[in-house]
Image (cartoon, grey):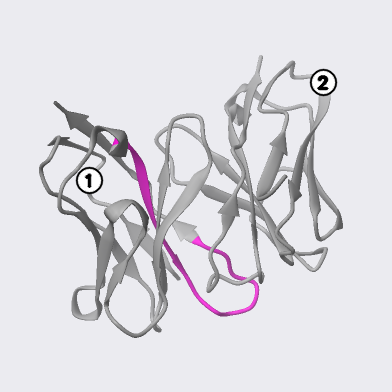
Amino acid sequence: ETGVTQTPRHLVMGMTNKKSLKCEQHLGHNAMYWYKQSAKKPLELMFVYNFKEQTENNSVPSRFSPECPNSSHLFLHLHTLQPEDSALYLCASSQTGTGDTEAFFGQGTRLTVV
Amino acid sequence: AQSVTQPDIHITVSEGASLELRCNYSYGATPYLFWYVQSPGQGLQLLLKYFSGDTLVQGIKGFEAEFKRSQSSFNLRKPSVHWSDAAEYFCAVGSNQAGTALIFGKGTTLSVSS
């Protein structure tokens, strides 16, 4: 398997549930990202991990908790979400944690909060 | 701060006609510029990128883009559109500064009519 893989592809969860999104990259990259894509809004950068260290957190609510155990895996732990958190969550990776290299994206997880 | 503007939210082009999608950026130094395409329910795929050198860059699927520093623009073009080009197109800007990541525009939705 190559590229960036996200699981699950679709997730429906209640506001009191706890779930996790998983991302795995097979590209040998050192940086991984979480983006949120809502309807009619630009892609919102949520978190950046560079060599497993979090280098950016764009004022994301604490109900979203990232985890990066190694350079190949990235998780987004979700708890007590709100309906407005429903969106497509995209994981990406790049060689470095800067914006001068292209990012490779997974297919995303479509999250619906009910 | 970096920013990207895609003035056109939605464009419809006849199959076989030429296409130009506009992108304007704001960045103090030389930017790193990208165009991505997203099909429904999918992640983003890189079409082309500009880092330096020749201001006209060629990408995949017959797309090209021209960097114009004087106009702060990086417009995407294709001489003859195919129905399969219908998708959402995102322009992005980055830098080589540590702790940065790609900043995306809001996207332009392309529809292709027969």
Q: Quadrant of the C terminus of chain B?
A: top left
Question: Which amino acid type corresponds to the residue marked 2 in the rendered image?
Answer: Asn
* Residue B96 counted in the magenta span: yes
Residue B23, x across and y down, in percent? 27, 59
For the point 50% across and 35% down, the residue is A38
Is label 2 in a helix, a strand or a loop?
A: loop
Dot 1, how many residues are within 10 Å of its Cα: few (below 14), some (14-19), or many (20+)?
some
Horizontal side of A100 relative to A70 (left or right) equals: left
Between A99 and A65, the one lying in front of the other is A99
Residue A14, x across and y down, in percent? 74, 16
Q: Give the number of marks.
A: 2
Evaluate whether residue B86 shows in this view: yes
Residue B32, x across and y down, in percent? 43, 73
For the point 58% across and 42% down, the residue is A36
Q: Is residue B13 above or below residue A69?
A: above
Q: In this view, does A112 lie above or below B41?
A: above
Task: Identify the magenta region.
Answer: B86-102
Tag 2, which chain?
A
Disc 2 designates what residue? A17
Horizontal side of A103 relative to B11 (left or right) equals: right
Residue B113, x across and y down, in percent? 16, 28
Q: Is residue A69 above or below residue A83?
A: below
Dot 2, how many residues are within 10 Å of its Cα: few (below 14), some (14-19), or many (20+)?
few
Between A24 and A62, the one lying in front of the other is A24
Question: Which amino acid type corresponds to the residue marked 1 in the rendered image?
Answer: Asp
